Image (cartoon, rainbow, N blue to C red):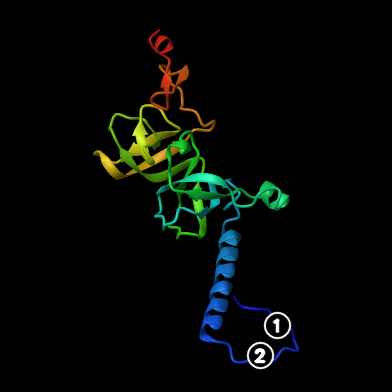
Amino acid sequence: MHKQVTTSTPIATPTAAFHNDTIAAIDNVNKLMRREAGNPQIGNNNDGTVLIKNDSGSDAAALAALGISGPIVLPADNEMSFTTRIAVKCVSLITSHVMGKFVVLAEPIKNGKIGRAWISGTCPAKIYVDSADHDFADITDGILKTCENGTCQILWQEPGTGANKYALLRFCGNGLPIGTANYQTLSWDHTEQKWKADWVRSHW
């Protein structure tokens, strides 16, 4: 832990660790300033991305999904930051992250670091394809997986089934599965923990 000094404090030659820490801190600040200057939408959700902190305990790859655990800055700590910039802490996926409580990383983010992730709109992702006939994706069994109804509509996915398949996803705006001519009425299945089409309405 480095201590601040005053103008009258005698200063010895900085250690290599002190010098490297200082250079790293300056580089990080400059990097963030250049990033936001080049794209003022970052962190403001205009392009569907927000700033996230990776609290999962391990490094996360681009296009992977992480679950939202809460805001980085609480309103009690800094109301202005909370209300003007969406920034969330993210952890490894669990069942409760179903119904849109997750993000898709726009870049690799090391554990404990901050980066960009999609929280809305359309984005590329890597998903587990359970069936090529599924039109949606959501959190199932702790992974982003295809399903009959979910919070992300699959616009395209690469052929085949299994893990780490590339896909283009569109987050549903209201957090509920998108309706179609056959799926206008939805009900929550507590046993399967997912939204399902109402049988009577879908078979009129």
Tag 2 secondary structure: loop
Q: In this view, does 3 lie above or below 117?
A: below
80 relative to 201 in the view: left or right: right
Residue type pointed to by label 2: Ile
Alpha carbon separation for disc pair 2 and 1: 8 Å
Q: Tell me if label 2 and label 1 are in contact, CB under 8 Å.
A: yes
Q: Which residue is pictured at 50% across the width and 39% down the height?
A: 101
Residue located beneath label 2 in the image: 11
Q: Position of residue 12 (x, y in %)?
A: 62, 92
Q: How crowded is mark 1: few (under 14 residues within 10 Å), some or many (20 or more)?
A: few
Residue extending farthest left: 160
Pinpoint residue 46: horizontal percent, then vertical percent. 58, 45
Is 177 placed above or below 102 here? above
Q: Residue furthest top?
A: 204
The tally of labels here is 2
In the rendered structure, which amino acid carries the disc numbered 1? Val
Q: In which quarter of the image is the C terminus?
A: top left
Q: Which residue is drawn at 40% across and 45% down?
A: 124
For residue 5, the mark is: 1
User: SS for tag 1?
Assistant: loop
Residue 60 seen in the current view: yes
Q: Which is more N-terminal, label 1 or label 2?
A: 1
Residue 47 appears in the figure: no
